[in-house]
Amino acid sequence: MPDLLRTRVARASSSAWLLLLLTTLFWGGNVPAARLAVGEISPMVIVAGRWAIACVLLYLFLPRNVRAEWGNILPHWRWIAFMGATLTASNALIFLAAVHTSGLNLAILQGVTPVLVILGAWIAWRTPIGAVRWVGLAISIFGVVLVATKGDPLELARTKVNIGDVLQFVSSAIYAVYALALRNKPAGSAWALFALISVVSFATSLPLLAIEYASGATIWPTPQGFLVLAYIAIFTSLLGQIFFMRAVELVGPGRAANFHNLTPIFGAILSLLILGEHLQPYHAAALALVLGGIALCEKWGRR
């Protein structure tokens, strides 16, 4: 490989690492945010509100040259509609699942996303799955399980599957499809693409909000609910998604999906800081496993 190309690849990988670390940090913040939202704002108000705020911010701050890209992107409206609806469905299922199942189950089932992405890449494009990569993924997922079970993996055997578990698994599968579909994104900056996806996500969230309102389950945000909504809209919905799209552009969906395992780790750390939970030895052990598994996939598992 020529030195210039090697340098560019190294820089792209370094940038992707930073973007993915920030993305998983923002997504991990959903753990304390979700806990702080209980009784302060209802799930579908969060889903609709987060995209409404993201759309407004994007409209206000997008430079004109980015808006000019929309004319070239809109002919790919089917892809945009698919991506926006996919994000809405995945988000809505997470909040619905949280009503029926425990945080333990949610964390474990979110950890299957990288495996689903790799399997999906194999099904769609026959992307090879090497043994070393499987080992790295297994190590990372075991770290996720260690956090979710509070250091007792045998707890998995005593956990009963319910409708919430099914909803969370479907949510993870839908998000894996979203990650894979980023590979086929039309030409354009991440900002321009995500602005259009956000509009679709907001539009497709409105029927869900109407159903929640009709059922009498709507809770309009209190002051604390507004703060939670603002965090989710700005960091999870806006910056996190844009950073993830750019990282996929740099290193591909499979390698980017490896970092999903960091999300519950950051969620645990932020819970310590924000919710006052106590640090346990298994947190440190799980962090080492997750980072070690990702390093194994990145350094020795690539073709």
Image (cartoon, grey):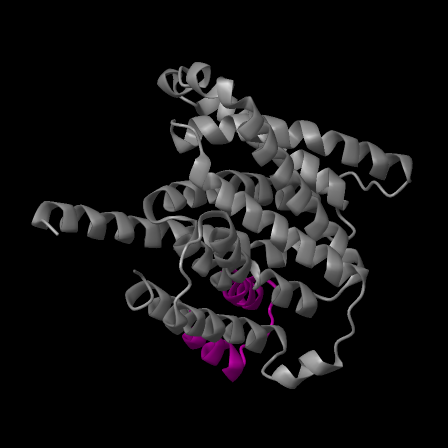
Residue 242 visible to the viewer: no
The residue closer to the viewer here, 156 or 26, is: 156
Identify the image quadrant of residue 190.
Answer: top left
Name the residue at 56% across, 64% down.
111
Spot occupied by residue 145 in the image (x, y as percentages of width and height): 58, 74
Spot occupied by residue 19 in the image (x, y as percentages of width and height): 37, 49
Name the residue at 55% across, 58% down.
116
Name the residue at 55% across, 28% down.
80
Spot occupied by residue 302 in the image (x, y as percentages of width and height): 31, 61
Name the residue at 54% across, 71% down.
144
Residue 11 visible to the viewer: yes
Identify the image quadrant of residue 159.
Answer: bottom right
Point out the residue furthest to the right here: 215
Residue 215 vertical placement versus 96 (above, below) = above
The residue closer to the viewer here, 98 or 271, is: 98
Region of the chain picked out in magenta, as a range:
263-290
Dominant secondary structure of the residues highlighted in magenta in the image? helix
**Image side of residue 92 versus residue 39, left or right:** left
